[in-house]
Image: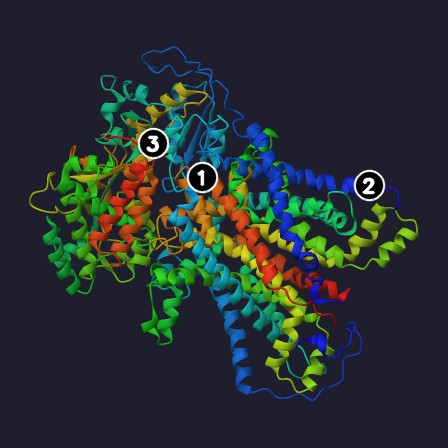
Amino acid sequence: MRHGKYRFLAWSVLPGLALYAVFVISPYAQAFYLALTDWRGVSARQKFIGLDNFARLAGDSLFWTALRHNAVMLLVVPLATIGIALFLASMLNLAGRGGRAAIQGVRGAKFYKIVYFFPQLLAVSIVAVLWQFVYTPNSGLLNGALNAVGLGSLTRPWLAVPSLALPAVMTVMVWGSVGFYVVLFSAAMQSIPRDVLEAAAMDGANRFVTFRRITLPLLWDTVQVAYVYLGILAMDGFALVQILTVGLNGGGPDNATEVLGLTLWRNAFVYGRFGYASAMGVAMFFLTLALAALTLRFTRRERIEY
Amino acid sequence: MTLTQQPVARASAPGMASPPQLPRRRLPGLFNAFSHAFLVVWAALVVLPLLWAVVSSFKTDAEIFDSPWRLPATPRWENWARAWNQADLGQFFLNSVIVVGCALVLTMLLGSMLAYALARYDFPGSRVVYYLFVGGMAFPVFLALVPLFFVVDQLGMIGTYQGLILVYTAYALPFTVFFLTGFFRSLPNEIAEAAFIDGASHEVAFFRVMLPMAKPGLISVAIFNFLGLWNQYLLPVVLNPNPDRQVLAQGLAALAVNQGYRSDWSAMFAGVVIAMLPVLVVYVVFQRHIQAGLTAGAIR
Amino acid sequence: MTTSHLLPHVVQSRRTLMRRAIAAALLAAPVTGSLAACAIGAGDDKTTTVDRGSTSEANPLGAPTDKPLEIVIFKGGYSDEYAKFDEELFRQRFPGVKINHQGIQKVGDVLRPRFVAGDPPDVIDNTGAGRLDIASLIADGQLRDLKEVLDSPSIDDKSKTVRDTLLPGVVAKGSVDGTCYQLNIAYTVYGLWYSKPLFEKNGWAYPKTWEEMLALCAEIKKSGISPWTYQGKYPEYMNDPLFSMAMKAGGPELMAKLDNLEPNAWRDPAMVAAVEAIYQLVDRGFFLPGSEALSHTEAQNAWCQGKAAFIPCGSWLESEQKAVTPAGFDMVVAPMPALSGSDKLPGTAIQGAASESFIVPTKAKNPYGALEFLRTLVSKPAAKKFAELAATLPSTAGGTEGVAMTSGLASVAAMVAAAGTNVVSLNFGEWYPTMGTAVSNATGELLTKRIKPGDWINRMQKAADDVAKDSTIAKHKR
């Protein structure tokens, strides 16, 4: 290739890489090492204990409980988010009638796209505080709304019921995520050629068929990426659970909303077991990678050229 | 069953003549009504809690708890004043603007160069570099906090703007590189090739040709980075103990801690709204570009 | 053209993407040892040169007169104004000392790296959510024994030691295995709160025994008010009444058994009776519906609005509720009723704890200045200012003399005076934080009737046994 390539590569790659190596890779690398120690996190004292932390992890029932909850979240949060976002996005981009172009969004689509994105603008801590007021039993917005529409019998102390607490948390996650994916899917839908959809319409396909046979396959790659992003989100959930849920440091009632991030945080910062918590972090790291790989594998389909 | 079996035309470029009117089948009205209702309901679900926070910021604490649904008897502007003064939000606001602004510029500069190099050049180790960045998105940040403190401390940058800016940049890079690498790959090769043939250097090809072409992608990733960095809390808490250098997220946390002891919810809501407003403004002003950036691959 | 222009590389290389990332991560692992060795432990070898000033009657600890002093205060509900006042007191006596004051919220997050680096501040108010874990600090030898300051003469009365000027239980609460590491300057006692006018209006008398309590609750319920509410989001608030009753019934022996993780300690009859007593509240429907999901502020506000008659809380309640308490509410606190007629401690006995825990790190650069500052903190003028600003009881005896007393604070002072030396507390939650989590969860379940008193006992016995047989946890004795 042309000369000057390596000079250009050097100054375009090295500064960013150096910054990343110093501030991100080296601390993470140290955390990997700390997973092999009994470090308490309040002094420099640490003893190398090999894989003891990982052995302990295998017998830690709370860790497995948390893992189970993350697994549920991993299934429900992306599916619900993607489902709602796909529905909203197709309404906004493809469901409209009339005008000169036959396929377009509903009236006010622009407005909706702006509004739906709002939750994405809020810090997680603010989202958690807001939803605390939604769920609180006696003066909360949710029970208040149920009472107002005559469904008073459905009111519950949402976050204090073990079977409802995790769904309540997942609802908040879905609420906070849908907006982004509406925008993402809208972008993808905009690039679906109109004539394809219109040809389908002319062939007499109704909206459901068009969506299932044409829109969804054409969006599949985007959906896949969305699943990976949402999976990473569902593996975390720490801040939300810690602020929103019941119990000493959250995760309640009785560990019903315990998630890996919280177990890890609790071990490090409350129990003074930084070494053990680092081992959890390492486990989480590989789990996240493995899940991402699995997701991509199982959602593989033939690419569609058009 | 998939589209590949159907004879389909290649996409027509946007901006071409609109397709002709089509005979449209009317869908069941019930479904339409339901769908529209759902659009409205979702908008309400999204807006109501936020609106409620805004209204609450004008109430007294007693009003917030006694009648969460009612409007305040008189709007309490003093909540805002209290939040602004007591928590020193003015100074924090300025710090946030400085730190996030500088970090954003640096992130975009370093990130786009990295992504461009990774996307368009094959050099030894390029794959390793790329996956190092991708892997960085899968590890919980708080485990890196203590080691990170030592790194920043040894550079003498604890509690300084430059320390925070560099760290923010470093932690914003994985997503930026991930996103932009894909973006640069999707850009057509021909124009850069043409520039090279005209004798342009790699630098000129990048800054004069490729970067302007990538503008939609740059803007959308910049907006995501802005949102993420503006709301960043864990990193400044540890790296930024200096009260004069604290950012808005820290000021808000102070308000939240205080309400845990003093029940000053109204000031907390005022603080929440104060922190929310600039983000909202940035979003509403630039929102068109977010979708444009995401769609850019198609409208190039 | 394909739809994969959205982040297309993910799709294009999806088969190799994650495999490569994993490989990269594994590659990074072997180099970690050397990296870690250079950063963590950086400041460990720093030796602190202690320059101690010359001792005198005015300066018995020998605080240096010119060495800077770094003080970090938890800036929470009590703010840090009181500390600034105390620093001014200190400055008057040591004008050459430059004081570096910081008021912060997340004490642990901010100071942990400095402890690891061996560069902690001189004085720390280790308080609030997110404080440093005391058990770990002690296990790693990071805290200084405060014996010197406790045995030094009080600033106000040279004939007394600082230890003698502190209220009962303060030194014990800050001690582990006989060494005092924490000086708690706020004296927190726990009890049951109610509105005096509300009770007078209805002719309700505060019950002396649990039997009377249940009878009164039935009466209160008939009047349309819920008898109790509690801070259900944090169920440990209900542990205070629960353990208060258990300890009154079982006496100091029970406390020692529980804290020392003795086999079957939790099956003690007094402990069982207390759990069954508390369970009656939920079994008979005496709680405000929905209490189990209320945050502390929400529950306390509901109580202030007269939706419930009793709420358990520590002595900070009045100042916490200041902004939302209706005029004429006049809250007062009282000790938990006696569990039975054969309790080992008198009915006036209360559970005491302490907050605003001041510590001095072993690696403090100006330890004698730090100790002298602690001595200033518990002096009478400082204690009075604290009582005034924080509207709470200081740990120094007589610290509220001459301070205008509100209804609640006056009742706290009276309750403390009546209790005398019968102020009890348990340490297992602080020594063994996993048990703190376990007891919070168990009580939360008990109060929603999802478990029975017997299950509660079994859970706690198991949590204690688990700690007892875990060799990685340092054990303590009381």
Q: What is the C-alpha distance between the residues marked 2 and 1?
A: 45 Å
Q: Position of residue B146 (x, y in %)?
A: 52, 36
Residue shown at the point (42%, 52%) measured from the top left: A66
B274 to the left or right of C23: left
Quadrant position of the N terminus of chain B in the picture: bottom right
Camera-near label (2 vs 1) is 1
Q: Give the Cα separation between the discs numbered 1 and 3.
A: 17 Å
Whether labels 2 and 1 share one chain = yes
Camera-side mark, 1 or 3 = 1
Total count of labels: 3
Seen from the viewer's position, the closer of residues B54 and B154 is B154
Task: Give the amino acid type for the residue marked by disc 2 in the picture.
Answer: Tyr
Q: Tell me the CA gap for discs 2 and 3.
A: 57 Å
Q: Secondary structure at mark 1?
A: helix
Q: Chain of mark 2?
A: A
Neighbours of disc 1 within 10 Å: few (<14), some (14-19), many (20+): many
Q: Quadrant of residue B11?
A: bottom right
Residue depicted at 47% across the width and 46% down the height: B253
Percent position (x, y) of residue A78? 53, 63
Q: Position of residue B122 (x, y in %)?
A: 78, 48
The answer to whether residue B53 is visible is no
Q: Which residue is mark 3?
A: C474
Q: Which numbered circle lies on residue A6?
A: 2
Up/down of C345 relative to B193, above or below: above
Q: Is residue B295 above or below residue B121?
A: below
Describe the element under mark 3 as helix, strand or loop: loop
Q: Which residue is mark 1?
A: A53
